[in-house]
Image (cartoon, grey):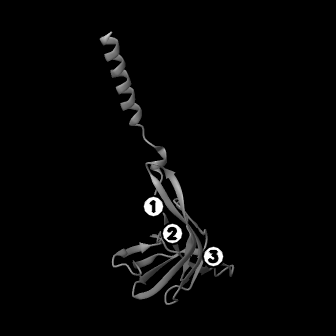
Amino acid sequence: MKTKYLFFVIIVTLAQFLFSCTTDDECRTDKTVEVDIAFKQKSLNATTGVYSIVSLSIDSLWVQGLDNDSLIYNNKKSVTSISLPLKKFSQQTDYIFRFNDVTDTLTVLYTTNENYYLSLECGCIAIHNISEVVSTQHFIDSISIINPDVNNTTTTHIQIFN
């Protein structure tokens, strides 16, 4: 009788160990929510006279969050796009950009900071909806919001034109 009981305890313990070590595929999703910004410029085709939008490579870029001492990008070379974090408990995030020797500020305004539940183990992520983006216009000529929904998928949200 004791042998059957011992065998049963070993089987149950082994089953608990094996099934408790399964991974949660939802945790594999990216939990970082950032706004993706692409640098663009309008280019005139001399033969057709039609403007097209092309990528702009920034020679040297510094980006710092306003009210934050640390640099997000420190003299990054040949930049065509960047990803920046948004404040989780605010509806506005401000950045200081330095393009080579020209400085601009960029303000991203967003209407919602909605928590999206992933799982008990992974927790929540904050998703946002961009309502407006404004900047000083020293280097930046104009700004276009391409996709206002900022979540954990990778897509261009904002285009900055020079």
Query: Which residue is more in the foreground, 111 or 154?
Result: 111
Taking the view exactly as shown, the residue that stands out farthest to the front is 1
Residue 35 place in picture, x, y as percent: 51, 69
Residue that mark 2 sits on:
35
Query: Which residue is more in the foreground, 55 or 124?
Result: 124
Q: State the residue at coordinates (45%, 43%).
A: 24
Query: Please, what secondary structure does the residue beneath circle 2 have?
Result: strand
Task: Say few, some or many: other residues with alpha carbon within 10 Å of mark 3 (under 14 / 14 to 19 / 20 or more).
Answer: few
Query: Please, what secondary structure does the residue beneath circle 1 have?
Result: loop
Residue 136 place in picture, x, y as percent: 51, 88
Q: Amino acid at mark 2?
A: Val
Residue that mark 1 sits on:
32
Q: Is residue 42 left or right of residue 95?
A: right
Task: Report, in whole angstroms, how far the alpha carbon at label 1 lies from the one at label 3.
Answer: 32 Å
Query: Please, what secondary structure does the residue beneath circle 3 have?
Result: strand
Q: Amino acid at mark 1?
A: Thr
Residue that mark 3 sits on:
52
Task: Say few, some or many: other residues with alpha carbon within 10 Å of mark 2 (under 14 / 14 to 19 / 20 or more).
Answer: many
Query: Which residue is more in the foreground, 69 or 5?
Result: 5
Task: Report, in whole angstroms, how far the alpha carbon at label 3 lies from the one at label 2.
Answer: 24 Å
**Numbered disc in front, either 3 or 2:** 2
Task: Report, in whole angstroms, how far the alpha carbon at label 2 lies from the one at label 1.
Answer: 10 Å
Q: Amino acid at mark 3?
A: Ser
Residue 8 place in picture, x, y as percent: 36, 18
